Image (cartoon, rainbow, N blue to C red):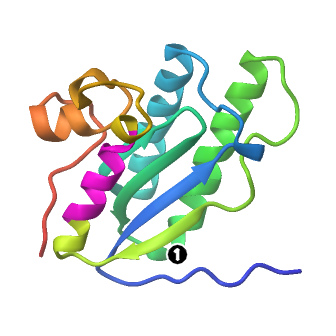
Amino acid sequence: MSNTKRALMENACYHLLTRGNQKQRVFNSAKDHLAYLSLLRRFKRKYKFHIYAYCLMPNHVHLLGEIEDQTNLSNFMHDLNRAYAAYFNNTHNKVGHLWQGRFKSMIITKDKYLIDCINYIELNPLRAELVKQLSQYLWSSYSARALGKDDKIIEELSLV
């Protein structure tokens, strides 16, 4: 069975979600998180993906941003997920699939819903009771976006 074609739209943002296979953990240590963030920096530059929010949860990842050439969205996620899976499998002496199927993508228009989506993404660690305060969670864009800590990942949001 072939996959349905992914919806793409100019001048829109995308909420991307990728989950560990069978909801397994994809981050076991700070080293894993840092490796993913390093790869994210690399591929966001390569594909000109402007990231406005992200959150690395123990078994899934949320990204929110826009890509200059929408036809590269799947290539961006493919390269990012493939590179991290290779790192993870090598580091943890694993084989096989790390990610569960295709990544999900939701089109987000540049209006109030975009801000709501950023808040939804960054509130994940609180909802999952991983921390008591968002500033304690090291693996999301919250500290960079809300507290001004430069993480070399997120970019200033333009609603134009």
In the image, the segment drawn in magenta is 115-124
Q: Position of residue 82 (x, y in %)?
A: 69, 44
Q: Does residue 111 lie above or below 131 as drawn? A: below
The quarter in which the C terminus is drawn is bottom left
**Residue tagged 1:** 71
Q: Quadrant of residue 154?
A: top left
Q: Secondary structure at mark 1?
A: helix
Instruction: Classify residue 57 as left or right of residue 157.
Output: right
Does the segment drawn in magenta span residue 111? no
Residue type, numbered disc 1: Thr
Residue at (56, 22) in percent of width and height: 32
Q: Quadrant of residue 139?
A: top left
Instruction: Classify residue 67 as left or right of residue 134.
Output: right
Q: Does residue 20 lie above or below 112 as drawn? A: above
Q: Position of residue 97 (x, y in %)?
A: 82, 42
Judge whether residue 51 can be spotted in this image.
Answer: no
Q: Position of residue 151 (x, y in %)?
A: 26, 30
